[in-house]
Image (cartoon, rainbow, N blue to C red):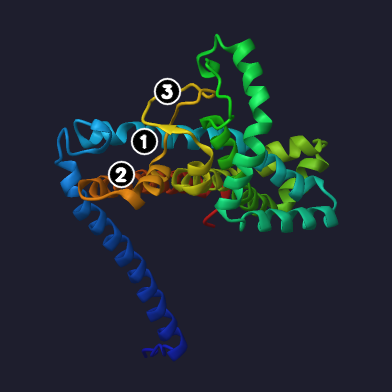
Amino acid sequence: MTTKVTVRVGDRVFSTITVVAGAVILATLAAVAIFLVIQSIPALGAGEGDLPNSATNFWQYVGPLVFGTVWAAFLALLFATPLSVGIALFISHYAPRRVSQTLGYIIDLLAAVPSVVFGLWGIVVLAPLVQPLYQWLGDNLGWIPLFAGPVSGTGRTILTAAIVLAVMVIPIMTAICREVFLQAPRLHEEAALALGATKWEMIRMSVLPFARSGIVSAIMLGLGRALGETFAVAMVLSPAFVVKFALLQAQNPNTIAANIALQFPEATGIAVNTLVASGLVLFAVTLLVNVLARWIVSRRAAFSGANG
């Protein structure tokens, strides 16, 4: 005797909606990619005299921008990652309940602050504040290539832009890490404490291994925002088409997003195609970062219980 399975109307409607939503996302992504590729073709084939900044080919033009984008994002994550993990651990395992709730609300609110506000803070408050520190670093540690002079007199350097980016991504990274830490198995934590482990040893043995894939996801999400940030970097940075690791000088490598924001209003002809082509490069870099993050998370999923 066979049993007939009855599919409810609600289940069918919900299934259809989810399939359509997924298809819309894929179609939108494909449409953006096709637009970028089509508009980039003239710039990819352009030669010397047609491209901005006297570049002989497109890759010579976009190379310094890719370097500046990756360098600024790397510096931002260097500052933001330990701070985000530390704040998340304090909220989830150390702070009293009322304090943790208040800090959680503040972190969530900071994540919604527009980037232009961070840019204004960076150029008006942060840059003048850190310039004396930059001068001290240049005078005392100038023998290190990263701190080589001449030091910028305004404080508008790649290091300042990286600090602003770090402040921008800390709320997002902290919120994700906090939720992951709170999902750590309570029985594992209590077992570690019962065996005589200190609180830090319990966190190191029970919480951090469980949350490793979540931390990686938070880092990659922060990296994605840092790579694509526009106005905050454009307002803080004194950009130039250079490739240098020096952090304190007046001439700094620009980022792709900031360059597009600054140049697009006045661009015409092949210059527009060049900016769109640089946007295609940023699109590819961001997509690669997300694919890499998904791969790393999937490798740790069985261990962490992320997909359990």
User: Is 234 left or right of 26, judged from the image as shown?
Assistant: right
What distance separates the C-alpha of mark 1 from that of mark 2? 8 Å
Where is the N terminus found, in terms of image quarters? bottom left
Disc tally is: 3
Tag 3: Cα neighbours inside 10 Å, few (<14), some, or many (≥20)? some
Q: Provide the secondary structure element on which disc 2 rests.
A: helix
Residue 244 is tagged as 3
Q: Is residue 305 visible?
A: no
Of residues 165 and 286, which is closer to you in this image?
A: 165
Give the residue number, with chain letter if any, for mark 1.
Answer: 65
Mark 2 Cα shell of 10 Å, populated few (<14), some (14-19), many (≥20):
many
Label drawn at residue 278: 2
Kind of residue at disc 3? Lys
User: Amino acid type of disc 1?
Assistant: Leu
| Residues tagged 1 and 2 counted as in contact (Cβ below 8 A) | yes
Which sits earlier in the primary sequence, circle 3 or circle 1?
A: 1
Question: What residue lies at 23% left-to-right and 31% top-to-bottom?
Answer: 54
- Whether residue 289 appears in this view of the structure is yes
Question: Image point 49% across, 21% down: which residue?
Answer: 246
* Sequence-wise first label, 1 or 2: 1
- Tell me the kind of residue under disc 2: Ser
- Where does residue 267 sit, x and y in percent of width and height? 29, 49
Residue 178 vs residue 4, the one in the foreground: 178
Q: Residue at x 36, y 35 (%)?
A: 65
Image quadrant where one finds the C terminus: bottom right
Q: Position of residue 247 (x, y in %)?
A: 52, 24
